[in-house]
Image (cartoon, rainbow, N blue to C red):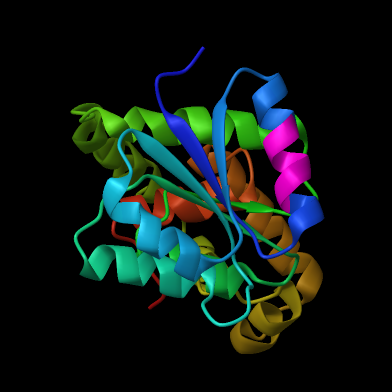
Amino acid sequence: MTDYTVHIVDDEEPVRKSLAFMLTMNGFAVKMHQSAEAFLAFAPDVRNGVLVTDLRMPDMSGVELLRNLGDRKINIPSIVITGHGDVPMAVEAMKAGAVDFIEKPFEDTVIIEAIERASEDLVAAEADVDEANDIRARLQTLSERERQVLSAVVAGLPNKSIAYDLDISPRTVEVHRANVMAKMKAKSLPHLVRMALASGFGPS
């Protein structure tokens, strides 16, 4: 079904094998790597590959892996899988080049759709500029307070911290956050962060 290989990097063998089995059953060509170092050594030989890496790993994290790939000018569309509470690190991963991050636990369809989106980067997408302009237009519809909340969300701050910093109630933060999601047409938190970073919007 696909003309590219999905490379799974995870130090936990059961997780690695489970994800590989699911993707193989859905028609993907898959290769497993037990550590970031193992994949980094193999990376120069990758042709038409999409990387799915865990964020927290011993010795070298997913973020460090992406930075190493960037330093070596090895361009592989990458997806980072992260545990709950790792949003700040996941944002750093996107700044290091990840095209998406997915929070655990996730449905099979979520990772499959993310891989298919990432694979589109294997062919130059001229629509990127138009998409960025569209996102910037949506950003212009946000109020000043909503922009402040979005900036804090992109920085990975939880609602309670945002409420404290802006001197408003956590409930008010939730309302602003919901409005931001609606105005930006974001399907999820990762989608919102991805759009913000793609447009050049970041923590102020």
Whether residue 78 appears in this view of the structure is yes
Instruction: From the top left corner, tell me how far across and down residue 170 is, in percent.
Output: 78, 73
Q: Main secondary structure of the magenta part?
A: helix
Instruction: From the top left corner, tell me how far across and down residue 171 is, in percent.
Output: 80, 67
Q: Residue furthest top?
A: 1
Q: Which residue is at 40% across, 31% downward?
A: 119
Eyeballing the image, is 90 above or below 2? below
Whether residue 180 appears in this view of the structure is no
Q: Which residue is at 37% across, 63% downward?
A: 41
Left-right relation of 188 to 119 = right
Q: Which residue is at 24% across, 39% downward?
A: 133
| Region in magenta | 16-21
Query: Which quarter of the picture shows residue 89?
Result: bottom right
Q: Is residue 17 magenta?
A: yes
Q: Is residue 30 magenta?
A: no
Q: Nearer the viewer, residue 103 or 166?
A: 103
